[in-house]
Amino acid sequence: MKNRLFLLLLLIIPFFVYSQEKIKRVYEISVINYPQIIELIEYESGEYSGNIITKITKGKNRTSWLNRTWRSLWRVESKEIMGKTPLDEKVVEKVMSRLKENGIETIKKCSDDKECDNYRFLDSGAVAFRIKLSNSEREYQFDEIYPLKEDNKEKIELRFKVQKLITILYEHIDINQGFADLLETLPKGHYHWYRASGHSIVTINNRELKKQKL
């Protein structure tokens, strides 16, 4: 009898674990100001999880010919650092529900909308979306869209829809905290990252930032 019960448990437990971990949908949203991706996950089990993923590179971004040659000669590679700040499950559930209600899974790409596609920016940052469902996956991005305030409402209908999505994100998630959490764990020194569009580079001195908090 005990042997049968043991075998039954061996069969049931893997199935239970698999059902707990099977992913139903994933939203990944990058932000403009910081090198971050907001990862939101819903599982088939009805559970949720999420992270603020922050990626920066150690050192200054030196692009001179001499520096590039020296790094190539000595095979010096840039060290990328990644930090994850977990999000509360209830927050993730609420955010994903609101994002879905506001069309995150079906919104058109800017290139598919004539009015939006004609709107141009120079060397701008971009908000990028990656939506993964059980039977499909799509990506799209929009230049220079920020959370809604009194004086920055987007005039183009499609861009305004995206602005509402970004606003929902900022209403429920402290984006800055994920960045601060990573910096707190790093040694003093210089770090840099590319803005969301990849057109410009931001460099910070972690030593100076820590002094400011003292």
Image: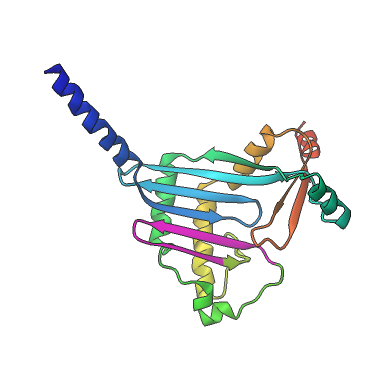
Residue 29's x, y, as percent?
53, 55
Residue 175's x, y, as percent?
59, 47
Q: Is residue 130 left or right of residue 65?
A: left
> Magenta span has 129?
yes
At 68% from the left and 57% from the top, the residue drawn is 195
Report the label total.
0
At 53% from the left and 73% from the top, the residue drawn is 110
Residue 157 seen by the camera: yes
Q: Quadrant of the C terminus?
A: top right
For the record, the magenta segment spans 124-141
Front-lying residue, 213 or 45:
45
At 55% from the left and 77% from the top, the residue drawn is 116
Q: What colour-coding does the image apply?
A: rainbow
Q: Is residue 14 above or below residue 113?
A: above
Q: Is residue 155 above or below residue 44?
A: below
Q: Is residue 118 above or below residue 56?
A: below
Q: What is the chief secondary structure element of the magenta stretch?
A: strand
Residue extending farthest right: 66
Residue 148 seen by the camera: no
Q: Is residue 15 left or right of residue 172?
A: left
Residue extending farthest top: 2
Residue 105's x, y, as percent?
41, 63
At 38% from the left and 60% from the top, the residue drawn is 101
Residue extending farthest front: 73
